[in-house]
Image (cartoon, coloured by chain):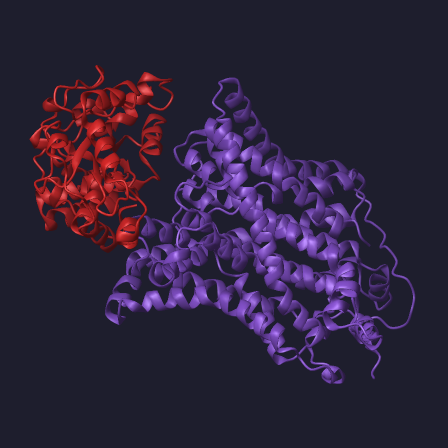
Chain colours: A purple, B red
Amino acid sequence: MPASSEADVGSDASDADLEPVRARRSARTPWLITMAAILVAALVVAPVLVVFGQAMAAGAAEASRLLFRPRTAELLTNTVLLVAITVPVTVVLGCGAAWLVERTTVPGASLWRTLLLIPLAIPAFVSSYAWTSMLPSLHGLGGAVFVTALAYYPFVFLPAAALLRALDQGHLDAARSLGLSGVGAMLRVVIPLQRPAVAGGALLVALHLLAEFGVLQMMQYPTFTTAILQQFAVGFSNAAGSLLAAVLVLLCLGMLALEVPLRGRARIARLGPGAGQRPVAHRLGGWTLPALGALAVLAGLAVMVPTGIVLRWLMRAINSGAVEAGSLLAATGSTLGLAVLAGLAATLAALPGAWLLHRYPSRLAIGLERLTYIASALPGVVIGLALVTLAVHWARPVYQTAGLAVAAYTVLFLPRAMVAWRSGLAAAPTELIEASRSLGVSGSGTFARVVLPLVLPSALAGFVLVFLATVTELTATLLLAPTGTETLATAFWSASDQLDYVASAPYAAAMIALSIPLTLLLRRQILDQR
Amino acid sequence: MGHQLVAEGSASPADVFLTENSPAMTLVERNNLLAPLDEATRRQVPANLMPSSKAWTAIAARSTVLVYNPSKLPKADLPKSLMDLAAPQWKDRWACAPGGADFQAIVAGMLAGQGEQKTKDWLQGLKANARALQNNIATMKAVNAGEIPCGVIYHYYWYRDQAGTKEGSGNTALHYFRNRDPGAFVSLSGGAVLAGSKKPAEARKFLAYITSPAGQKVLVDSQSMEYAVGTGVASAPALPPLTTLQAPAVDPFTLSSDKVSTLMTDAGIL
């Protein structure tokens, strides 16, 4: 039996996990779990097939007429421009802030770490509502880039900061001893180490931009997602909308494919024992004040201004008695109900695939995991449109039920639950499971008594991640929530679409209040560990 | 919503269908989903505000208007007709909300009155000249802020704002096209009972109430500033009477939302 120490290479173990381990073939892969994992993967792939099927149902002539027209080119240009400009901006903001906070002597680093993460708790459409209420002339590409960059830079900041925290002085010392200058060491050691994390963060930003609806609708900046919803409003699930959705899916898959070369092939290797040493922070000296100023401006624009404006409108709403407590409570109730169901569904659905990959890794298990990864690229509007089409044509009983909305959330947020399970299962090595089996405990008994207690914290973290993603989900909910059911996001949207800033404020505040715990949880999980 | 009802077909749980504009109602009607209208209900609304098919009734009405900012657009330069706005001199000088059902009803009226070719040409002009905003309120506020000289909206947004804080329309004025122009199109909000309703008696009673003087008074008292359609019911005093607007005579039964969305998709607007 080969020693399994190679499998314990810290958090970068993903490569090692994915290689089939021949020695584990002794356990027969249980067919029940395999079937369950395949079923879940099929659920994830189904929307893509439905969208393409619906797009092609119009026939080749009609499809090419609808596809190859100036409007599609206009939407494509807008979408590509938005991504091409915003992603580099977020990379600069995220990496710059991460460097200042983690690698320099800037005062109040702990405060900045929390503050700079708060934009994750404020849905982008809420901060665009706040900004347009203050600056109504903010619109178009400029407005869209401004709001989305401020909302999404944490996707780059978080992994960049985590990696910089884990940086080992030993790497830098080795570089210096080989003749590199300070800047040279940065370019040849630090940046290549950062590449995978920053590429991953940039990919997340790009995917969020492709899926973005609320901000772009408010900024009157048409992209594929806004056009798909517009087509849905005039024609329900028609060919034009499905064609646009098909193009959007291709764009998202293209982004996924782009990430691989961007990530680079750098691997961290460590020879010999010894503890990592926290690197010496750069002394800022005279640059302290400008650095503080820069961080303050970023935190101010991204956090203070939106929350301040929401609070101001909320105060106005309370003072003028415009808060409809009944509707607010009903919306909160629906939102929480859907979010709990979605959290449970996604957590349970991710388990077979994660368990399969952990305990019985094989080509099939790896393939299923990759399929789930692709699901993370699909925008809410595509999933929503696909499920509406599916339900109306083939599964009428589930149409307009909460169950369909929960199915959409499961597909959308499955990857988050999967990631949480996988990191948790890494804490339950196969040796423990095999030891338990050899002592006579059944498979399910082992799971309940040995594995579950170890993975429960991670499973709960996965549940919370899905829960909170559902609370702020807008586009799929607009398409799928049963007529008459309002969530906080859709109620907010109805009011803010009418430019009724006062009426939207309570819903915006409720969403932010429910999302703050996520941010604190993330900060603890990722940034507080060495 | 109309498309949703068509997709749901006879299995729809809905009893009554109320629309803000008539094309959606016509769509549902053409799919044979409406129950026949009570004679008594029909008599409560003037015949000129009813579709020729008599399958549904109007419950309210709204007029197309041009909201303009006098400091950016002097009264002498106002367009004589809605069709003028497609001309090159109006480039970047007007706004509308083409993605919404309200504007699509106006285009449907133009299609019925002016024919397909003129509507197509006008839509090309819209694409080239107009700024597309997300809804009527955004259009009105943009004109008010001076961002754009004028915009095409429905009348009641302006009157509502004027009756309230005036913060969305304080710097603006309204221009009625009149002269049976497409820009004077009056859109009817419709009401009908669905054929698949499980409570047809209650549904018919409800519809009869909406069009009765008592029901129409509720509409007028609600400060929504829409026109009441019931015979003998006066609308809010601030509004110019419906009969003075010289709206083009368009049979609501001929309004087709699908044709409009095809034309707008072809023009690159949607």
Answer with the quarter of the image where residue A241 lies: bottom left
At 26% from the left and 26% from the top, the residue drawn is B156
Quarter of the image where one finds residue A472: top right
Q: Residue at x 29, y 54 (%)?
A: B7
Residue A198 percent location from the top left of the image: 65, 58
Which quadrant of the figure contains the N terminus of chain B?
Answer: top left
Task: Give the answer, above or below, for where A477 lies relative to A130.
Answer: below
| Residue A258 makes an appearance in the image | no
The percent coordinates of residue B59 (x first, y second) are 20, 31
Relative to residue B204, is residue A41 depicted above or below?
below
Considering only vertical position in the picture, is A139 above or below A401?
above
Question: How far from the left and from the top, in percent, is residue A287?
Answer: 75, 40
Q: Is residue B52 left or right of residue A355?
A: left
Q: Is residue A293 visible?
A: yes
**In x, y percent, where is residue B86?**
18, 42
Q: Quadrant of residue A105?
A: top right
- Can you say whether B8 is above or below A315 in the image? below
Q: Is residue B72 left or right of residue B107?
A: right
Q: Which is nearer the eye, A274 or A183? A: A274
